[in-house]
Image: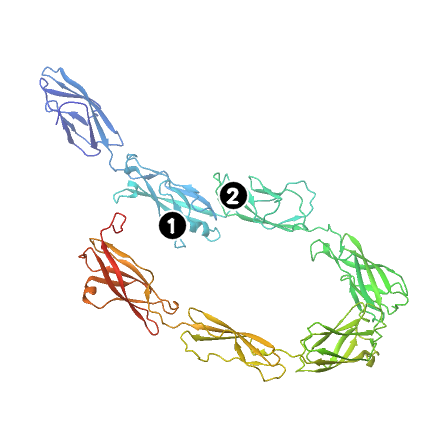
Amino acid sequence: TGPLKDMTFSVPEGSGMRLIYQFTVEPPAVSFRATGEKDGILDIDPKTGVLYLNGSLDWETKTSYNLQVESLDENGRKVNGPYTVIIVVEDVNDNPPEFDQLKYSGVVRQNSRPGKPFMYVHATDRDDPSTPHAQLTYSILHHFPNPYPKMLFQINNVTGEISPSVTGSYYLDPQKQDSFTLVVSVKDMAGMSMNGFTSSADVFITVKESLWKAPSTIYIQENSTQKHPVNITQVHSNEPDVNYELFEKEKLPRLPFSVDQNGIIYVTEPLDREEKDTYSFFVVAKDKEGELVDKPLQVVVVVEDINDNPPVCQKALTVLEIQENEDVGSNIGTVSATDMDEKDTLNSRLQFKIESQVPAVPASNLFFIQQDTGVLQLISRSLNKQIASNYSLKVLVKDAGFQTICDVQIHVIDINDQIPIFEKSDYENVTLAEDLPVGTVILEIQATDADEPLTGSSYIIYEIKEGDPNKTFIIETDPKTNRGYVKINKALDFETTPVYNLLIHATNPEPLVTGVQYNSSSFTVFKVFLSNVDEAPVFSQEAYITEAFENVPVNTLVATVEAFDPEGDTDLQGLQMLQSQVQVQDMMYTSILLNFTDNAAQKSKATFIINLKDVNDNPPRLAMNYASFFCHPLVGGERTLIQATDDDEQRFYSTFTFSLKDDMNTRNNWEISKINSTHAYLSPRHTNFEEKVYNVPIIINDNGRPPLEAEINLEVNMCKCSSEKSCF
């Protein structure tokens, strides 16, 4: 109740007859009157001033009512008003959502982009759109058929857009399943209420083959005379209004291809197979935001060969040799040529033919060339070096459309019918000191050969046939003069071999003709005497390595070294240590220089290394000088970190055990807890400490072999602290 004034009331729709408000009578008023949008449902009792509803409101019919209310005196004259009274109809969720179609149909392409809508459904709700009553949520209830664990389609729960899922983008294939039926539901109350209304509709989807396919390999003939650019293929995106682009993985100076916005791919210029025979690039489709709408497609272009390259002689002049006594059919050599056209095609097939032979004596057809291989053969046994020592051939080489001439020169070489003959059959002897260095020339020898100079028939190879099984000597030949140089190949040793009786043989690399053999004229002898040189003793090893514990007693035998005299002298003056005493403190190893002398005061040296092994001979200690303190008074939970170390080798002795001294005062006041092998925490057991310095005895054991332990007094200061957490 209340006085008459402008007022607004909210009334839920469908609530039926009810009292809304009672206006109080203020004299001289005795009654009320209401006019306006009463619509036979709203009114006011004139005497009591009760505003009431005598029927049900419907938000979907009318959302508000405007009334004018005034008070009247006993004569019916207006006292107050009119005042505006507004009745706002509150919506309740009394309408289910409705699809705008009972059935929907759509088409999706194979390999369509996941999340890209290809159709949508739409529903409406007659309830108030500003309330959850008309907020709709879409979902897929059923999916027929569904051959995979995950759905092939998805729906935007707000917009109703239907698109392929990630699974669908991969698996949709019209060859396997070309149609699907979805049961799509829509629910009001934003899908958040169990009392919301739900409606459903069927969606029929047809799967069609993807338009986005890589074209088959494209073949383009090189050096095309067509007007460029030339259309070579076309691609089609599954989606409209896309932009096509080309890109390449190879970094070519230029890509002779382009694509227009219809997906037509062009070759922009004539191609040259010899420059590049295959192109591989990619075409992509992008939406207006520049995002890819499909996976890139690979385009492969093969450049087809035409016969546009002549044969090329591999050498400006091919030089071959043949002996004058070669048999008919002998292979002289090969004329080689190349063709840059495609290999293993008729365009690069080469054929050979002898066009001319100069001189044409003793016949004009002494040689034959195999048509398809270029192999030259002797066709007549008429060669005679005295008549002609050289022949010049013109060889025609041709492919299907071009030809060229290759020049060939054939040298007729003398047959090897003469043997090398030494100028001396005995080079007597030479005496050498055994310490001459390797490579020293000890003798020059000479043989001659009457065959044609500077050929394999006249070149001489010197070889020691007897007297040098270990190849102590070698003989090198000067190719211009055929002079031989006998050199030391290995170190000489008088004690092993004091004398060499050498038998030297001279031969040719070219085989002798039938009926000719090497004889005694191709052999010579030579004797080498070695003179003894006093040599230094030799240790059995260049270096001796042993190991010993660092605490080994003085005069302990740690190793034995051996030496011998190459001269066979056993009267060595013995081992001298140039370092008289081994120092073992703080050392990983000690190096000692050993010296042997013989009677001639020849000396040799060797290195003796002792690797010292650590023993556990150092007790543990604190890693640093600790100045530990706790802020007084204690509050609980305080602790200080301590670290132990050991002067022994840490890789063996680095695991420490921490404990407190076994006295009641220490154990009642302190406790120690190990963190790891080298660290521990020291903590007070209570907070009732005085402000002073405490000595805490700590026992640290290194767990070595044998174990060593140390008792360490750690000073702990209980002090008043500054704001920086340090003692005053």
Rendered view: 343 above or below 269: below
**Residue 599 sits in which quadrant?**
bottom right
Taking depth in this image into account, of 712 and 107 the one nearest to the observer is 712
**Residue 682 sits in which quadrant?**
bottom left
Taking depth in this image into account, of 715 and 75 the one nearest to the observer is 715
Q: Which residue does the image show at 62% across and 81% down from the upper left? A: 566
* Nearer the camera: disc 2 or disc 1: 2
Rendered view: 500 above or below 38: below
Residue 77 in view in this figure? yes
Q: Residues within 10 Å of mark 2 (few under 14, many from 20)?
A: many
Q: Residues within 10 Å of mark 1 (few under 14, many from 20)?
A: some
Q: Which residue is mark 2?
A: 285
Type of amino acid under label 2: Ala
Q: Which residue does the image show at 59% across and 48% down from the upper left? A: 251
Please report contact status of discs 2 and 1: CB closer than 8 Å, yes or no.
Answer: no
**What separation in Å lies between label 2 and label 1 (alpha carbons)?**
31 Å
User: What percent of the width, then of the height, locates residue 180?
Assistant: 42, 49
Q: Which residue is mark 1?
A: 143
- The quadrant in which the N terminus is found is top left
- In primary-sequence order, the first of circles 2 and 1 is 1
Judge left or right: residue 422 versus residue 550.
Answer: right
Residue 468 in view in this figure? no
Badge 1 element: strand
Judge left or right: residue 242 versus residue 183.
Answer: right
Type of amino acid under label 1: His
Rendered view: 355 above or below 8: below
User: What percent of the width, then of the height, locates residue 224?
Assistant: 69, 45
User: What percent of the width, then of the height, locates residue 680?
Assistant: 29, 62
Taking depth in this image into account, of 687 and 376 the one nearest to the observer is 687
Judge left or right: residue 528 versus residue 166.
Answer: right
